[in-house]
Amino acid sequence: MIMVLINKSHPDEFILLGFTDRPWLELSLFVILLITYPMTMMGNIIIILVSKLDPRLHSPMYFFLTNLSFLDMCYTTSIVPQMLVNLGSSKKTISYMGCAVQLYFFHMMGGTECLLLALMSLDRYVAICRPLHYTVIMNQQICILSVSIMWLGGMTYAVSEATFTLQLPLCDLNKLDHLLCEIPVLIKTACGEKSANELTLSVVCIFMLAVPLCLIFASYACIGHAVLKMKSSEGRKKAFGTCSSHLIVVFLFYGPAISMYLQPPSSITRDQPKFMALFYGVVTPTLNPFIYTLRNKDVKGALWNLLRTIFSSK
């Protein structure tokens, strides 16, 4: 399918400039990625295993959390292995087909995460503000259907936006001042008229970033009001614990994504895409398991139970 959608005048490969003008930064980044990538994979695998193996975590909240962990594993895998290869060698290239595949997968995962974080906030809203109706509203069929729609939405966003971007004329330009293939940087690199692409990207990102973020804020405004009315201090503490973890993840992901995608690509500064992509593509997936584990008593308890079972069996 991708072969049909790509630009016929494309170069054979792109040179990813990254931080070639700062070798010391390349070496530091290579070491950091070499350490954090296995940590990310291991942390998210543990979250998935604990949520599946412990019956106490068989609830919609942890069903969404396992999807987020799987999503983060795919998200970071779509860029980090290629980054490690380029940072660890003198050849800083990626084939055009490799760039197109990365473009689709990276943006599919990013778009899906935007929607999934909004769905998770809606789950918390129903659990805290409509507790008597929670099991009816968030039943298994609704949860599976909701997550399927989120994945389909992310896929639709990636296919439409990436395909539109890949049709831009490149005029034999094959140098990208970035660590990976990303839509705003490709639009900025393209020659000719690209205002339509910039406008389309802005409009689409309003729906993929701004609308879900508004839904998250609205959900937490209602949650905050409901928590303040709680008479039990233990109930307030538990609600705050589960919601604060999610809010931290929201700010870590949405902050850099908004600064990158809700401004015209032509106004993006030179190093902004590199640091922002590292933040929402590497830092956030690495921190998510620690945030949800360290700040969630149920997950910590399930993890200790799993470790005790493993060591006692030995």
Image (cartoon, rainbow, N blue to C red):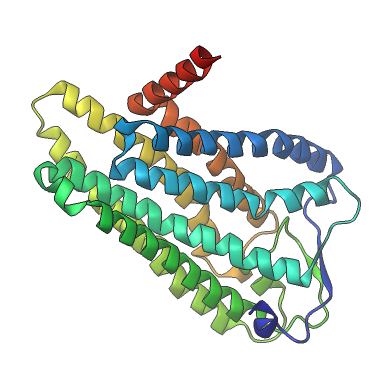
In the rendering, at what x and y percent does residue 245 appear?
38, 35
Position of the N terminus, as image quadrant, is: bottom right
Q: Which residue appears farthest toward the right when viewing the image?
A: 90
Going by the image, does 191 lie left or right of 313? right
Going by the image, does 172 lie left or right of 118? right
As displayed, is residue 197 above or below residue 140?
below
Residue appearing at x 22%, y 51% in the figure: 138
In the rendering, at what x and y percent does residue 47 appear?
47, 35
As displayed, is residue 55 above or below residue 162?
above
Q: How many marks?
A: 0
Occupied quadrant, residue 150: bottom left
Going by the image, does 228 lie left or right of 169? left
Viewer-nearest residue: 93 or 307: 307
Residue appearing at x 55%, y 49% in the figure: 280
As displayed, is residue 224 above or below residue 314?
below
Going by the image, does 307 lie left or right of 136? right
